[in-house]
Amino acid sequence: MLLAIDIGNTNIALGVFEGEKLLKHWRIRTEREKTYEEYSITILNLLSLEGIEKREISAVILSSVVPPLTPVFQDLSRIFFHLRALVVGPGLKTGMPILYDNPIEVGADRIVSAVAAFHKHGGPCIVVDFGTATTFDAISEKGEYLGGAIAPGIQISAEALYLKTAKLPRIEIRKPRNAIGRTTENSMQSGLYFGYIGLVSNIISEFRKELGRDAKVIVTGGFAVFVEKERHWVDFYEPNLILDGLRILYEKNKQEIHP
């Protein structure tokens, strides 16, 4: 079985694959101060609850946008599973030309999701990942990574309203019943939700001017659930896109660790 791990700024996504099938997946909170022993205990408990034994994990692949945690999970793989983790980064075969001016600036998670999106849906396509930041990635008809856009995530926007004002409360992010709010909470929900929908749909519209009107839109990420019903611009909702991408990249590179 393959253990796929994606370390994000807010959450860590974990998935166990048997062949191409995603058997189980979880999200845990990203905590930069935790040791590999502490993360090992968490992962062991998750596996045990699903009846998966540690010895059944035969390979580990890892992507990370939190540099201090990369060696922590490499140690976890080496010491806990007795496996060398395949780490997404320079030198890893992706099969996707990166046309960024400086390719190493592109986050590993964005490349992994782009590879999965093109593999599953072809191009041209646009991947919108609703995480701590909301990222937009453009993939050409030929499968080239062209670049993208980065915007503050909806949770960051909500927290900014709470932290930077004297009287506005911390609120639950959800679609309000009406756009015209009659309470402070409803008004904030309206501004956040419909404002964010406007931001996303406008960026997609601008991307399609350059990619072509037929560019497919794939949404993913922890907060995608809030917008995936906006079917006028969402073609595919892929909650586990990055885990699928990690599996695909493992298949392309497994000779590196299993010569």
Image (spheres, rainbow, N blue to C red):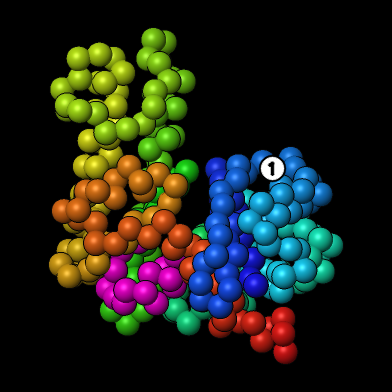
Identify the residue at the far top of this view: 167
Examine the residues drawn in magenta and state their main secondary structure: helix
Q: Which residue carries the number 1 mark?
A: 32
- State the residue at coordinates (29%, 69%): 125
Residue type, numbered disc 1: Arg
Q: Name the spot of residue 129 as percent of width and height, x first.
A: 40, 54
Q: Name the spot of residue 200 as percent of width and height, x first.
A: 27, 48
Identify the residue at the far front of this view: 51
Does residue 105 appear anywhere in the picture? Answer: no
Quadrant of the drawing holding the C terminus: bottom right
Where does the magenta region start and end? 110-127
Q: Name the spot of residue 161 as percent of width and height, x first.
A: 39, 23
Q: Is residue 159 left or right of residue 2?
A: left
Identify the residue at the far bottom of this view: 259
Q: Quadrant of residue 247?
A: bottom right
Q: Is residue 217 left or right of residue 214?
A: right
